[in-house]
Image (cartoon, rainbow, N blue to C red):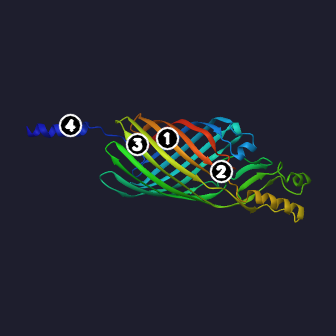
Amino acid sequence: MKKTLKAAVALSVLTAPAYAANLENPLYMPKQNEMYSKTSVGAMYKVADDTTAMVNKEHDGATEFPIWRLHEELGYGITDRLEAYAKVGYTHDDDIARKGMHQGRVGLKYRAFETTDGFAWDIYADAHLGGVSGMTGSYGLNGFTYDNYSNGRWGFHAGTQVGKTWSKFTGAAFFEVLQTFGNDNNEIDISKSALAAYVNMGALPDEISVDLKSTTEFNAGLKTFYQIDDRWSVGAGFTFKHHEDNGVEGLATSVPNNPYILGAVSQLEKQVKDMNDGFDEYIISLSGSYQLTDATQVTLYGEYTFDDAHQMSQNGTDVKAEIGARVNVVF
């Protein structure tokens, strides 16, 4: 009888659901020497709002679709509690002729604390790669027009996340700060600006660089996750993102010592000293995932963003929604 009971207990342990490591779980961290990849492809639909910047461009209320969004995240477990990661994002929007890398991060995450009852605390820091490519665009009589999604600035993120797992449910909260450092890593076409006459005379180049101010921004949010069974899981989240106003400290490109040119440049600098282009985002996300194998997972996701944009921002929207698919692989 005792032998039969022991065999039954052993069998129940072996046949109990054994969930594979789920990369959609906000508390997921790779084991030592384990590597993972998360590849996403999404399509975004936007309707521009009526900020002054959009009205000046006669783009208020205009629709942008499809805006293609690509994301890649790679991670590697240096130890069971220390992870190296990299995140890259790319956006392509034909409707406004704007494309380029919108995200670039490389850093480390450390699990500072973990308990047997499912509580975990992570701290992380990474390099902000906004300086990989310079900010490009043009400044005309209707304001500034972006060609890409880079701010041209380097910087760093520092953040923390706390969370807990209760059986099949996981909840987590995070907060992070982004500090960027002002520089002149930008190229701005002024051939159609108030300085166009001096460009046509050959007194000024048709492209200039300016010294941008440093900025401090932050993100915060909540993430939830539920493991339905050993194949299916769902997730939801809310994220708040604060984007600071940009500003110009001065002209980096040298100009002739001509009082008329210097006066015109000074007037232009005053207009962009504080660009009043900041905005806040409130992002709601939902996802559903299916575990194809122990190493491969497919996720469908959707995001809807509410925002509050300053009057010279070109990022404010009346509608902003994205749907896409993600493939997660553990190596």
Marks 2, 3: nearer the viewer: 2
Foreground: 21 or 227? 227
Give the mark nearest the N terminus, 3 or 1: 3
Q: Are marks 4 and 2 in contact (CB under 8 Å)?
A: no
Residue 276 placement (x, y as % from top left) = 68, 54
> Which residue, given by chain and number where applicable, does mark 1 sit on?
285
Identify residue type, mark 2: His
Report the Cα–Cα distance between label 4 and label 2.
63 Å
Q: Amino acid at mark 1?
A: Ser
Q: Which mark is residue 250?
A: none
Amino acid at pointer 4: Leu
Q: Quadrant of the C terminus?
A: top left
| Residues tagged 2 and 3 counted as in contact (Cβ below 8 A) | no
Q: x, y (%) of residue 330?
A: 43, 43
For marks 3 and 4, give the one nearer the viewer.
3
Q: Secondary structure at mark 4?
A: helix
Residue 301 appears anywhere in the view: yes
Front disc: 2 or 1: 2
Q: Which residue is mark 4?
A: 11
Residue at the disc numbered 3 = 225
